[in-house]
Image (cartoon, grey):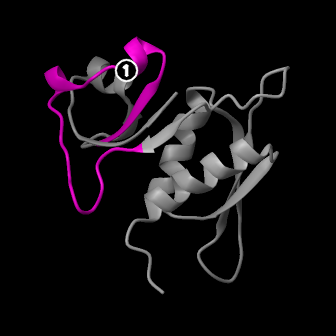
Amino acid sequence: MSMTDPIADFLTRIRNASNAGHATVDIPESRIKRDIAKVLVRERFIEKYVRIRDDKQGILRLYLKYTPEGDGVIDGINRISRPGLRLYYGVDKIPAVLNGLGVLIMTTPQGVMSDKQARESRVGGEPLCEVW
């Protein structure tokens, strides 16, 4: 069975693992997923990620972050632009997620970056997901 939206699958795996209290989650690797994981590490939503080589496409192992009380750092993670409905934001139209408490991860001509980085770089692009 083919997957029509691998990024949505990536986000769902993170959401489910975080809600279940897992320390790690394994996800089939791709360049875009690796770039999103880099932004999640930079924005401190996950501890780290490692690439695991196998005979196929490889695996990304994400180490999830939790508060001292045991709650997941990621409260919510949603897909924005999807294959059936593509969205694009100009630099002046990039919205703030929860008044700046969350992060919008975007793909731009300069690569995958957070909404804050996109505003600083003065580039727009396609919003992939929002995390808070």
Q: Which residue lies at the image location 45% right of the left edge and 27% below the top edge?
A: 103
Residue most extreme to the front: 19
Quadrant of the rendered image containing residue 115: top left
Reading the image, the residue beneath label 1 is 116
Q: Position of residue 54 (x, y in %)?
A: 71, 77
Circle 1 packing at 10 Å, graded few (<14), some (14-19), many (20+), is: some
Quadrant of the rendered image containing residue 47: top right
What is the three-letter code of the residue carrying label 1? Lys
Q: How many tags in the picture?
A: 1
- Whether residue 15 appears in magenta in the rendering, the answer is no
Q: Which residues are magenta?
A: 79-107
Q: Which residue lies at the image location 56% right of the left edge and 36% below the top edge?
A: 40
74 in relation to 120, above or below = below
29 in relation to 37, above or below = below
Helix or strand or loop: what does disc 1 sit on? Answer: helix
- Whether residue 88 appears in magenta in the rendering, the answer is yes
Q: Position of residue 14 (x, y in %)?
A: 62, 49
